[in-house]
Amino acid sequence: MAATSSPPTHVAIVMDGNGRWASRRFLPRVAGHKQGVESLQRCARACAQRGIAVLTVFAFSSENWRRPAEEVSGLMDLFTYALGREVDQLCKEEVRLRFLGDRSGLPDRVVQSIVDAESRTAAYTALQLNVCFNYGGRWDIVQAARSLQERGVPITESTLQEALSLSHVPDPDLVIRTGGEQRISNFLLWQSAYSELYFSDKLWPDFDERELDNALLTYAQRQRRFGKTPLQAIVDSPRLAPESAGDAP
Ligand code: IPE
Ligand code: IPE
Ligand code: MG
């Protein structure tokens, strides 16, 4: 079977398993989240080295507010602290940071650190790092539909796509989930329609270059067909995006 010929342009990751990583060490869950930040730095560097242009990660979901208040506030504190500490390094590595999610639900200090990090890294192009924070795929679709409605724009596949949070980048080619669960958990519901999925048993803090390479190797062995036959997929460009069937006359 013909496999994908080029590496993924856009990799998206559900960074799951921090809590279990900590529990196995008799540490508080937030220690796992802290280790998760280190793992993200390592992964972003590895993606840039491998020529991946866009990395999108799921850091806090719309549903994660359901966790104990102590863990939620620990995550907000860690997020603000980590951003303050890591942005210098990201600038050195020329990483452009963007944040996707509902900012209206976030504490002011968190929003401020997001705005600062986005503006400080706005000129960089080595890697686009999108961090989904207070994000849900359903929220994204609803906010996009609302914004079209408010502007009186007819809803089509392409106008909706344009109004979604990730409209600045192509859809993810590869979605990785660590932590052993095989579900999407309200991640990029619209954008992952034709993504290849890779589920890793590694807990996120243990996700390293080797496991990234395993995912990339698996991706390289897949044939992306976008609804076509295997033969058509060989003849046509493997990177061809699916036609917007919904908008066709
Ligand atoms: C993912 O790790 C990070 C967040 C959801 C914030 P978890 O905290 O879900 O870790 P597990 O799944 O409980 O091990
Ligand atoms: C998904 O992980 C969200 C993030 C990684 C931020 P969860 O741990 O919240 O997912 P479920 O609850 O196991 O589906
Ligand atoms: Mg989890």
Image: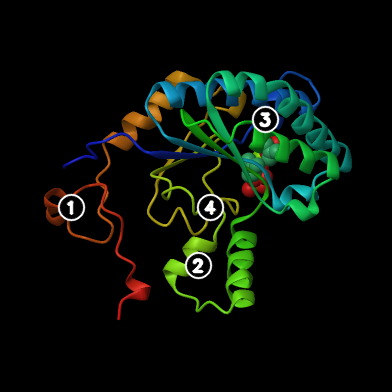
**Badge 1, how many Cα within 10 Å: few under 14, some, many 20+?**
many
Specify the amino acid type for callout 1: Ala
Are discs 2 and 4 less than 8 Å apart at CB? no
Q: Which residue is mark 3?
A: 18
> CA separation, marks 1 and 4?
24 Å
Q: Which residue is mark 4?
A: 188
How many dots with numbers? 4
Q: Going 63% across and 72% down the picture, which residue do you hit?
A: 146
Residue 33 sits in quarter: top right
Residue 233, which numbered label? 1
- Quarter of the image with the N terminus is top left
Residue 207: horizontal and vertical position, in percent?
53, 24
Look at discs 3 and 4 and give the one toward the viewer. Answer: 4
Are discs 2 and 3 less than 8 Å apart at CB? no
Residue 53, above or below 232 = above
Q: Going 11% across and 51% down the picture, which residue do you hit?
A: 235
Specify the amino acid type for callout 2: Leu
**Badge 3, how many Cα within 10 Å: few under 14, some, many 20+?**
many
Judge left or right: residue 137 versus residue 223: right
Residue 130 sits in quarter: top right
Residue 211: horizontal and vertical position, in percent?
45, 24
Task: Report the image quarter containing ligand 1.
Answer: top right
